[in-house]
Amino acid sequence: MILSNKNVFLDLKKGEGHQVEFKTSFGKEVIESVVAFSNSEGGKIYIGVSDSGAILGLTALPETIPNYINTIKQNTQ
């Protein structure tokens, strides 16, 4: 799913809810949210965002996303 900037900012403004989670960094909590969303109606996880919706950012190298995917796979099999 590709989100427009407008949709992202709307999610940030509305805050966390049934289908939106904010995480400051990638870790165990992200994996738990992935599992929860996969067992329900789905959802969006924003990494690099505080609980209040403030954009904190993160460093994303070319291998970052594949590493996240591999970590999720290894911890959910």
Image (cartoon, helix red, strand yellow):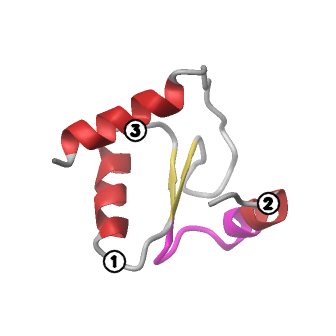
Circle 1 sits on which residue? Answer: 40
Q: Which amino acid, by three-letter code, is at mark 1?
A: Ser
Q: Inspect the image, locate mark 2, and give the three-letter code of the amino acid beneath it.
A: Ser
The amino acid type of the residue labelled 3 equals Ile
The verdict on residue 68 being magenta is no
Give the mark nearer the N terminus: 1 vs 3.
1
Kind of element beneath mark 1:
loop
Q: Position of residue 23 (x, y in %)?
A: 49, 48
Image point (76%, 69%), residue name: 10
In the drawing, what numbered circle is on residue 69? 3
Q: Residues within 10 Å of mark 1 (few under 14, many from 20)?
A: few
Element assignment for label 2: loop
Q: Is residue 62 above or below residue 46?
A: above
Going from the N terminus, do you reach mark 2 or mark 3 first? 2
Above or below for 41 versus 13: below
Q: Position of residue 54 (x, y in %)?
A: 68, 50
Residue 60: quarter of image = top right
Q: In the image, what residue occupies the spot 79% across and 60% down?
A: 4
The disc label shown at residue 4, or none: 2
Which residue is at a point 31% across and 42% down the rendered structure image? 72
Instruction: Give the magenta-colored segment's residue range.
Output: 10-20
Query: Is residue 36 rendered to the left or right of residue 54?
Result: left
